[in-house]
Amino acid sequence: MLAALSLPGRKETQNQETDIKSLIHINFDKCTGCSLCQLECSMDLTGGYNPRRARLAIEHRRENLYHFPVVCNQCDNAYCMNVCPSKAISRTDQGIVCIDAERCIGCGLCVEYCPIDMVAIHPGTGKAAKCEMCQGHPLCIEVCPTGALEMVTLGGEQE
């Protein structure tokens, strides 16, 4: 299952100048629920190990029989970007949806409209934060011991 649902034939909008080029692919059947991805992510974001502050989540289902990592889909038609009144959310040349902390007013609309709850208000800054794929080099993928998370370049090749 790819992190984004529909890419072919996408329509360009005012906020989206670039196609999505790569995504984090989730192999949930390989996830052991170890939380190393969350620990690495939270360390990068906050400077400390706190899985609740990570920019990805692990849903534990069926009495912990399986674990389902959830990451930002870098949506084709990103609701967070569309509702941001300060235009603090935009897509990079690599296709990654990013938040400009300088422009963010901390209103929380992006949090409210994210359909998978992957945008949060950072408690220290009061600004929105989300997975920005570590600017194309996701740390969560680097530390995943089982291959549950992989970078997929659209066009079919895995990195």
Image: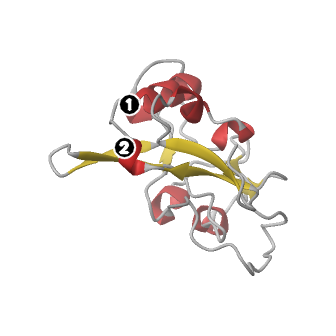
Choose between 159 and 81: the one closer to the eye.
Answer: 159
Q: Amino acid at mark 1?
A: Ser
Would residue 79 appear left or right of 92 to someone viewing this image? left
> How crowded is the residue under tag 1: few (<14 C-alpha within 10 Å), some, or many (20+)?
some
> How crowded is the residue under tag 2: few (<14 C-alpha within 10 Å), some, or many (20+)?
many
Choose between 66 and 123: the one closer to the eye.
Answer: 66
Label 1 to label 2: alpha-carbon separation:
7 Å
Residue highlighted by disc 1: 35
Q: Helix, strand, or loop for circle 2? A: strand
Residue 20, can we see it?
A: yes
Residue 130, can we see it?
A: no
Q: Quadrant of residue 39?
A: top left
Residue highlighted by disc 2: 58
Determine whether label 1 and label 2 are within 8 Å by CB. Answer: yes
> Residue at left 68%, top 72%?
7
Q: Amino acid at mark 2?
A: Ile
> Residue at left 63%, top 57%?
74
